[in-house]
Image (cartoon, rainbow, N blue to C red):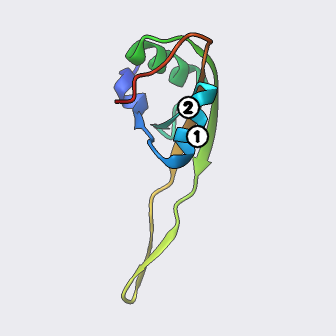
Amino acid sequence: MRNPHDIVKGMIRTEKGAMLMPQNKYLFLVDKKSNKIEIRNSIEDIYKVKVDSVNTVMMRGKSKRVRFAVGYTPDWKKAIVTLKEGNKIDVT
């Protein structure tokens, strides 16, 4: 079994994520190869909360240009985690 910190790399703190917090939903940057069950177990282990559901989205990298060279930002995976009623993650 992998380390939970290898699966969940960090919380994404954006305006869109802040708008989801009243609905008890949080955004996380996760490993591309992880599945929903691994993400659920890692969040419960790290933050000591109960997870209701996990939704994942593969975010494709964007093309970027520096002078004459064209490159891409890396692909990454985002998890939208809904917590059970009464659970909360302290984001401060």
In which quadrant is the C terminus drawn?
top left
| Secondary structure state at the residue bearing disc 1 | helix
Q: How many marks?
A: 2
Give residue 67's mark: none
Q: Residue at x 50, y 41 (%)?
A: 32
C-alpha gap between disc 1 and disc 2? 6 Å
Q: Residue at x 41, y 17 (%)?
A: 47
Q: Residue at x 52, y 61 (%)?
A: 61
Residue 18 location, x and y as percent?
52, 39
Whether residue 57 is visible to the viewer of this picture, yes or no, is: yes
Residue 25 location, x and y as percent?
59, 29
Left-right relation of 16 to 49: right
Q: Is residue 37 above or below residue 73?
A: above
Whether residue 78 is visible to the viewer of this picture, yes or no, is: no
Q: Are marks 1 and 2 in contact (CB under 8 Å)?
A: yes
Q: Which class describes the residues within 10 Å of circle 2: few (<14), some (14-19), or many (20+)?
A: some
Q: Is residue 14 above or below residue 72?
A: above
**Amino acid found under the numbered disc labelled 2:** Met
Give residue 19's mark: 1
In which quadrant is the N terminus drawn?
top left
Residue 22 location, x and y as percent?
59, 29
Of residues 89 and 81, the one nearer the viewer is 89
Of residues 4 and 15, the one nearer the viewer is 15
Q: Which residue in the structure is indicated by mark 2?
A: 21
Q: Residue at x 39, y 89 (%)?
A: 68
The quadrant in which residue 80 appears is top right
Q: Is residue 72 above or below residue 3?
A: below
Residue 64 location, x and y as percent?
45, 74
| Secondary structure state at the residue bearing disc 2 | helix
The quadrant in which residue 89 appears is top left
